[in-house]
Image (tube, rainbow, N blue to C red):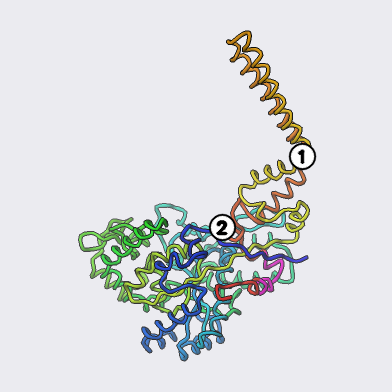
């Protein structure tokens, strides 16, 4: 018996659900077109070919850190034939973060394969590492299930980064901490010995060498694991990206009032349609960050100049322009502008995203329009649930579906045990309650005939009787639970594997323990099950 791979439905906001189920109802927020219509991709391809000068195609040759000669040759083909990219991306989570990072990537690779057959130009998948993000606490750890079936948190600690008052440093500039060696050793310890272990974990160890950029480590690990799917992997803070986008960032500053007005208007439009905005916007906030005294800091509009939100320092136009010219790494886009800068730097025909991304891209569309950047078709990623044989046996034994184990683990177990309480016991208790209620009603009626003041006495007695029945039921249920203790432990362990801490598996667990146990062929098995809106 091997691992089972169950395709899952993505769940998200009301806006995301409408995008999936009734695109036409939200089409005005996503002008690139339906992801299920091949014409949408052809339209964006035409827009790219119309707006991209030949010099921009040639500049793609300057993209650095290409994984292999094969990828370099593929990129050269893309430049020569004016091909396009299917983009996706993620934060630089430790050891590639949770499983859904893999699912996003494989969705992009599958879509690229399909579109190349239809568009008549080279189509490559691209994975972008969000290396300018400064949320260290979101990327410094990962989770896995160890050999004892316990949830283990692997984490690394960068000096000073645990201090909430510390500068907000982008992960591009955070070195891999020295305790990474303990994290790798722990990963080796808690994963099974298999024929795949060395070939998987040695490249991971090489990628996460102490002292190098944390974002670069993620990039190398990703390329080592998923490079065979033909990915161009880029970091948002790479020299090429910073050169290619600095004029757009300057344009965003010069048009900051228009940008703000359009975003506020889009937020109002979403609210009028009963959708919530994914990213809050204010009149004074811009979509730009600047590396100031307190690290990466949002630029606010104030009296015709900029002011850093956390540090409070003033930032003049001359200072901002000088930074973009001489130190472009100091200026970076916010979440709503980032997809625009990416589509400006690369010929992106489609973007593969999750529920939150697809929701906030409804806001980003106004920035695509403002800067004249073709907006890519937005494609939902795939989601899967990995069910190992040990878990499948528990589900089969108790005739349960995986979703029966969702939610709070303790509440789930209690619910399942209650459902498995002998029906005759439940029926007998129910009949007892009915008989007692009827009998007490008759007693109360008779008592009131000769003593109208006896209502309180009868009521108290009735309550005491019902409490006695409740106590009897609780004791009987406790005996049932004792007899089902094995079932309880098995269900809790199965739930831990499928819904760790009550959350979807894909959002918590790391991929490497599964790959060590089942080999890299598991990636191919998942890839074979990937479905896109085009098939």
**Residue stretch in magenta:** 514-525
Q: Principal SS element in the magenta part?
A: helix
The residue closer to the viewer here, 95 or 359, is 359
Q: Residue furthest left?
A: 303
The residue closer to the viewer here, 262 or 56, is 262
Describe residue 454's horizontal placement relative to residue 160 as left or right. right
Q: Position of residue 82 (x, y in %)?
A: 45, 88
Residue placed under numbered mark 2 in the picture: 155
Describe residue 314's horizontal placement relative to residue 16 as left or right. left
Residue 324 sits in which quadrant? bottom left
Q: Position of residue 379 (x, y in %)?
A: 51, 71
Q: CA distance from mark 1 to mark 2?
A: 48 Å
Q: Residue furthest front?
A: 449
Q: Residue furthest bottom?
A: 80
Describe residue 174's horizontal placement relative to residue 416 as left or right. left
Query: Within 10 angstroms of label 1, few (less than 14), some, or many (20 or more) residues?
Result: few
- Image point (65%, 69%), residue name: 201
Q: Judging from the image, what secondary structure is the residue with disc 1 in?
A: helix
Which mark identifies residue 451?
none
Label whose residue precedes the other's in the sequence (1 or 2): 2
Residue placed under numbered mark 1 in the picture: 423
Q: Is residue 520 magenta?
A: yes
- Image point (29%, 73%), residue name: 251
Residue 449 in view: yes
Looking at the rendered structure, the number of numbered marks drawn on it comes to 2
Residue 270 sits in which quadrant? bottom left
Closer mark to the observer between disc 1 and disc 2: 1
Q: Is residue 332 magenta?
A: no
- Image point (78%, 65%), residue name: 1
Q: Position of residue 125 (x, y in %)?
A: 53, 78
Describe residue 416's horizontal placement relative to residue 17 as left or right. right
Q: Given contact means CB atoms under 8 Å apart, are the residues at marks 1 and 2 in contact?
A: no
């Amino acid at each position: 018996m091997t691992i089972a791979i169950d395709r899952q439905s993505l769940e998200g906001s009301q806006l995301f659900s409408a995008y999936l189920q009734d695109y036409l109802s939200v089409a005005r927020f996503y002008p690139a077109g339906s992801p299920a219509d091949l014409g949408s991709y052809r339209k964006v391809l035409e827009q790219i070919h119309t707006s991209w000068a030949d010099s921009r195609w040639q500049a793609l040759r300057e993209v650095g850190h290409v994984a292999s000669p094969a990828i370099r040759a593929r990129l050269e083909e893309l430049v020569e034939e004016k091909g396009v990219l299917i983009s996706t991306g993620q934060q630089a989570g430790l050891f590639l973060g949770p499983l859904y990072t893999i699912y996003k990537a494989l969705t992009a690779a599958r879509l690229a394969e399909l579109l190349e057959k239809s568009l008549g130009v080279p189509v490559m998948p691209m994975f972008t590492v969000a290396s300018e993000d400064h949320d260290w606490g979101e990327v410094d750890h990962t989770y896995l299930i160890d050999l004892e079936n316990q949830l283990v948190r692997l984490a690394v600690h960068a000096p000073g980064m645990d201090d909430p008052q510390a500068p907000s440093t982008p992960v591009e500039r955070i070195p891999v901490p020295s305790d990474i060696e303990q994290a790798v050793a722990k990963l080796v310890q808690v994963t099974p010995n298999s024929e795949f272990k060395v070939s998987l974990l040695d490249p991971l160890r090489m990628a996460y060498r102490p002292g190098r950029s944390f974002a670069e480590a993620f990039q190398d690990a990703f390329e080592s694991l998923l490079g065979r799917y033909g990915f161009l992997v880029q970091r948002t803070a790479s020299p090429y990206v910073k050169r290619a986008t600095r004029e757009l960032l300057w344009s965003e500053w010069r048009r900051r009032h228009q940008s703000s007005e359009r975003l506020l208007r889009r937020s109002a439009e979403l609210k009028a349609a009963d959708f919530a905005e994914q990213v809050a916007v204010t009149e004074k906030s811009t979509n730009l960050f600047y590396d100031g005294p307190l690290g990466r800091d949002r630029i606010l509009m104030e009296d015709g100049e900029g002011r850093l939100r956390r540090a409070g320092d003033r930032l003049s136009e001359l200072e901002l322009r000088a930074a973009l010219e001489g130190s472009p790494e100091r200026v970076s886009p916010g979440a709503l502008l980032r997809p625009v800068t990416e589509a400006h730097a690369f010929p992106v025909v489609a973007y593969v995203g999750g529920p939150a991304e697809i929701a906030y891209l409804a806001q980003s569309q106004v920035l695509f329009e403002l800067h004249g950047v073709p907006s890519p078709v937005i494609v939902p990623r795939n989601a899967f649930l990995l069910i190992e044989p040990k878990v499948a046996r528990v589900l089969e034994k108790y005739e349960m579906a995986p979703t029966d184990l969702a939610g709070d683990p303790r509440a789930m177990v209690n619910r399942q045990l209650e459902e498995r309480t002998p029906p005759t016991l439940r029926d007998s208790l129910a009949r007892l309650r009915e008989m007692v209620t009827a009998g007490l009603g008759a007693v109360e009626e008779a008592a009131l005939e000769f003593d109208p003041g006896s209502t309180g006495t009868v009521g108290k007695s009735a309550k005491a009787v019902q409490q006695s029945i409740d106590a009897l039921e609780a004791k009987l249920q406790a005996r049932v639970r004792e007899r089902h203790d094995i079932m309880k432990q098995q269900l809790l362990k199965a739930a831990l594997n499928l819904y760790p801490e009550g959350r979807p598996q894909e959002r918590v667990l790391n991929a490497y323990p599964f790959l060590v146990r089942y080999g890299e062929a598991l990636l191919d098995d998942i890839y074979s099950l990937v479905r896109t809106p085009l098939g």
